[in-house]
Amino acid sequence: MAKIIDGKAVSAAVRAGAKQEVEALKAQGIQPGLAVVIVGDDPASRVYVNNKKKACAEIGIHSEEYALPKETTQEELLDLVCRLNDKKDINGILVQLPLPKGLDEKEVIETISPLKDVDAFHPQNVGRIMIGDYHFLPCTPAGVMELLKSADVEICGRDCVVIGRSNIVGKPMAMLLLHQSGTVTICHSKTQNLKEVCRRADILVAAVGIPKFVTADMVKPGAVVIDVGMDRDENGKLCGDVDFQNVEPVASAITPVPGGVGPMTIAMLMKNTIRAAKLQNEKR
Ligand code: GUN
């Protein structure tokens, strides 16, 4: 029986800490603020944005939503980002991705002030993560690190395998494990002998976006398995990248979906917004 790593509980603890930090900042006259920009009417994005606003309200962070129609032009979106860069009561800017077709995500990300980039997607922040001198960590990989810490998982010297090489999860995830002295392998769709590579992992992180991709024969007995996936199975039911039912008996610890990595992402966004408020107040 694997230990089930409870993302809801760890997220609640992180948010409680964040709430206390906000109260301490308010006592110094600093009110952290987050702007969330959503373009178009993607239903999943709408749910994510609502959850982010709810978390802000719970913690005492001022939040502003900018909901733009899907016909918004690149110029209009860049203009909004520039105005938010200059807005004094906004410390963090999050442009919900994916953007509708025709909009250039890369240019939008590069227009966000690096000091307000609470997603840590700006190339300057990505570079800072690479050299281990960062202000912000991307929310999902940072949430995974927090879960590993909560479960007392030793990373130093252990074999860590990350499946997936996205800029948002796979690449920064690998870098954070490396910073903790893990021996890190990144796998992807062209990796040969994927099963054998995964079976070497003491810590296996799945971020592929394919339902139940990680099967029991890919997991070393006693491994820690972290599931970043948010997929739908053949019956339309929410599931992860890991075949939980069959992998759980093999692993020593595992995150469920839902209730694992998902709740951590928003908690880490709250922490980044607080960090942004502190940074911007140091600079004044
Ligand atoms: N879409 C899905 N996840 C994320 C995220 O972490 N940040 C942003 N900006 N968009 C997303």
Image: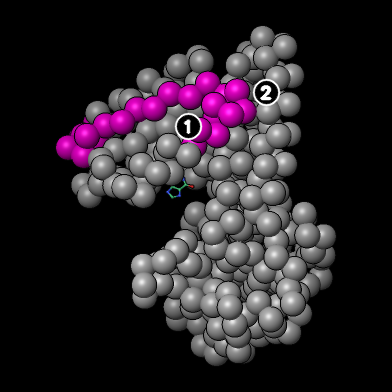
Other residues around mark 1 within 10 Å, as few (<14) / some (14–19) / many (≥20):
some
Q: For the residue carrying disc 2, how many other residues have a C-alpha within 10 Å: few (<14), some (14-19), or many (20+)?
A: many
Q: CA distance from mark 2 to mark 1?
A: 15 Å
The answer to whether 169 appears left or right of 134 in the picture is left
Name the residue that disc number 1 marks.
53
Mark 2 or mark 1, whichever is nearer to me:
1
Query: In the image, what residue occupies the spot 31% across and 47% down?
Result: 43
Q: Which segment did they paint magenta? A: 52-75
The first of marks 2 and 1 along the sequence is 2
Asked if residue 109 is among those painted magenta in the image, a careful observer would answer no
Place of residue 248 in the rendered image (x, y in percent of width and height, measured from the top left): 65, 77
Q: Is residue 90 left or right of residue 218?
A: left
**Which quadrant holds the N terminus?**
bottom right
| Total marks placed | 2
Question: Seen in the image, is 24 located left or right of residue 126?
Answer: right
Q: Position of residue 154 (x, y in %)?
A: 82, 65
Kindly state the secondary structure of the residue where label 1 is placed.
helix
**Residue picked out by circle 2:** 22
Q: Is the residue indicated by label 1 positioned so its CB lies within 8 Å of ligand 1?
A: no
Residue 222's x, y, as percent? 76, 80
